[in-house]
Image: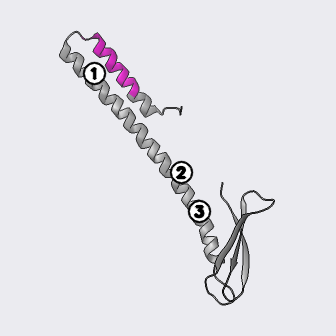
């Protein structure tokens, strides 16, 4: 997957490239090795920053999904209490609205015979 690098990652890669160029110019084997090690450190840091940001982005997406889902579940919890007897109702069906794309119809029934339907808007 191709994606744009952020400034911190670009900076790390630029520093790694600089270290590589410096290592290529060095004549002393010890200095050359030192610059190659610095290049490796900058590359590992770039990968670490990329991984951290990827995890952070994933965490944000999951949090957003769960927050939206929590709104739907709260509506369902309120609808799942029977207004006649106060007992918990059972969900018997859930289906998308016929004409509205982001709305679902939930149908509940209680042991006392009362039934109810409620619409819940899906967050997209």
> Is 116 within the magenta?
no
Mark 2 and mark 1: Cα distance apart in space? 38 Å
Nearest to N terminus: mark 3 or mark 2: 2
Mark 3 and mark 2: Cα distance apart in space? 12 Å
Outermost residue to the right: 99
In the rendered view, does 23 fall on the left or right side of 51?
left
In the rendered view, does 7 fall on the left or right side of 104?
left
Residue on which disc 2 sits: 61
Residue on which disc 3 sits: 69
Relative vertical location of residue 14 with respect to residue 7 in this rendering, above or below: above
Graded by Cα atoms within 10 Å as few (under 14), some (14 to 19) or many (20 or more), the crowding at tag 1 reads many
The residue under the point 41% across, 43% down is 52
Residue on which disc 1 sits: 36
Which sits in the foreground, 85 or 7? 85
Decide: marks 2, 1 in contact (CB < 8 A)? no
In the rendered view, does 44 fall on the left or right side of 124?
left
Q: Residue 26 is drawn in which quadrant?
A: top left
Nearest to N terminus: mark 3 or mark 1: 1
Q: Residue 71 is drawn in which quadrant?
A: bottom right
Helix, strand or loop for disc 2 = helix
> Is 17 within the magenta?
yes
- Identify the main secondary structure in magenta: helix
Q: Identify the mark at residue 68; answer none if there is no mark.
A: none
Residue 85, percent from left and from top: 66, 90
Graded by Cα atoms within 10 Å as few (under 14), some (14 to 19) or many (20 or more), the crowding at tag 3 reads few
Relative vertical location of residue 14 with respect to residue 5 in this rendering, above or below: above
In the picture, which quadrant includes the C terminus?
bottom right
Helix, strand or loop for disc 3 = helix
Q: What span is colored magenta in the figure?
A: 13-26
């Amino acid at each position: 997957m191709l994606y744009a690098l952020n400034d911190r990652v670009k900076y790390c890669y630029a520093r790694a490239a600089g270290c590589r160029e410096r290592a290529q110019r060095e004549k002393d084997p010890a200095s050359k090795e030192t610059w190659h090690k610095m290049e490796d450190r900058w590359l590992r840091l770039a990968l670490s920053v990329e991984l951290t940001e990827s995890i952070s982005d994933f965490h944000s997406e999951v949090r957003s999904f769960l927050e939206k889902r929590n709104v739907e579940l709260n509506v369902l919890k309120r609808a799942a209490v029977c207004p006649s007897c106060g007992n918990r109702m059972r969900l018997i069906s859930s289906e998308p609205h016929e004409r509205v794309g982001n709305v679902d119809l939930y149908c509940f029934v209680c042991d006392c015979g009362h039934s109810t339907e409620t619409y819940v808007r899906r967050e997209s």
